[in-house]
Image (cartoon, helix red, strand yellow):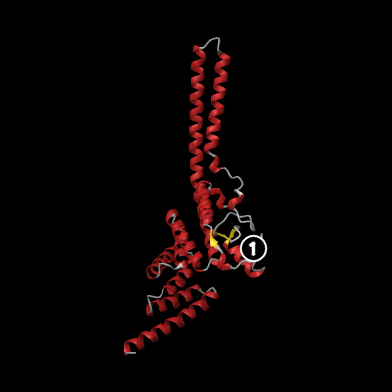
Amino acid sequence: MGPNGGALSAAAKQAEQLRIHGNAYFKKDRFGAAIDAYTEAITLCPNVPVYWTNRALCHLKRNNWERVEEDCRRAIQLDNHSVKAHYMLGLALLQKQEHTKGIRELEKALDLGRGTNPKGYMVEEIWRELAKAKYQEWERTSSKRSWELQSLKEACESALKEKHSLDMNHMEGFVDDCTISQLEQLEALERVFSKAAEGDTPTEVPDYLCCRITLDIFHDPVITPSGNTYERAVILDHLQKVGRFDPVTREPLDPSQLVPNLAIKEAVQAYLDTHGWAYKV
């Protein structure tokens, strides 16, 4: 190893020691000291993504979202598969009211997290934040749609009533028929607008879109050789803590036999796209 290589190795060791110090400060909620330690580590070795994400987490604890975004973007430049970087960037963008971009980053983090550690705590945490953001997005668009539908419905009812008044003037002797016709038209109008509002009206999520163990809507469904579909994290927990068998059929089951149920996953996403309220369920 040449002299330059030795210097690089020494810098890397020093940077790693600073990271350890930073972690110790973080655990004691000394975020300023942790930031200083991670900053020194970055100065020595600026191409190590974890130093940037660790510092971003400190900024997050201080609600310094601009710095969170800056550090996470740098970490992603170094490692586009960093779950933490995409996750915290998503949170920072949501804080800036950039909802579409924030949701996209959370979705990226969730996909990456499921690929690396589907049972990890971060996957569930990311899902909760994503579901909250999606639900809030649905609330905003739903309120707007409801107002637009109500305005349109009132305009249609007003037009029908005006038409009824004109018809009454030209249909002497047929008042009852005219009134019946108007009532039928108003009832039809009510059905049309009720149908239009169905997607924004909370109901029960269909059983086939819910895990048989938790009864919650699927996030990451997997199917067993016996044909039963479960939430991945839930069935993995069952196999680890209860036993390696299918909870329903009791047939032997190994984690390696679990296969993503893409059909159900697509069905869940399609349902959520048109029933945003289900993110809260």
Q: Is residue 169 visible?
A: yes
| Figure quadrant of the N terminus | bottom left
Q: Residues within 10 Å of mark 1 (few under 14, many from 20)?
A: some
Decide: is 250 above or below 278. below
Helix, strand or loop for disc 1: loop
Residue underneath mark 1: 246
Residue 270 position, x and y percent, is 50, 49
**Viewer-side residue, 249 vs 51:** 249
Q: Measured along the vertical axis of the image, is residue 271 above or below residue 248?
A: above
Kind of residue indicated by mark 1:
Asp
- Compared across the picture, whether 239 is left or right of 95 comes to right
Q: How many marks?
A: 1
Residue 167 % position (x, y): 50, 16
> What's the residue at 44%, 63% (across, down)?
89
Is residue 119 in sight in this rendering? no
Image point (38%, 78%), residue name: 45
Residue 107, position as x, y percentages in the image: 47, 59
Of residue 264 and residue 192, the one placed in the foreground of this image is 264
Query: Where residue 86 appears, x then y in whole percent?
Result: 44, 64
Q: Nearer the viewer, residue 221 or 143?
A: 221
Q: Quadrant of residue 258?
A: bottom right
The structure residue drawn at horizontal position 56% and vertical position 18%, both measured from the top left corner, is: 179
Q: Residue furthest top?
A: 173
Q: 233 or 257: nearer the eye?
A: 257
Q: Is residue 7 left or right of residue 124?
A: left
Residue under the image location 63 percent in, 67 percent down: 239
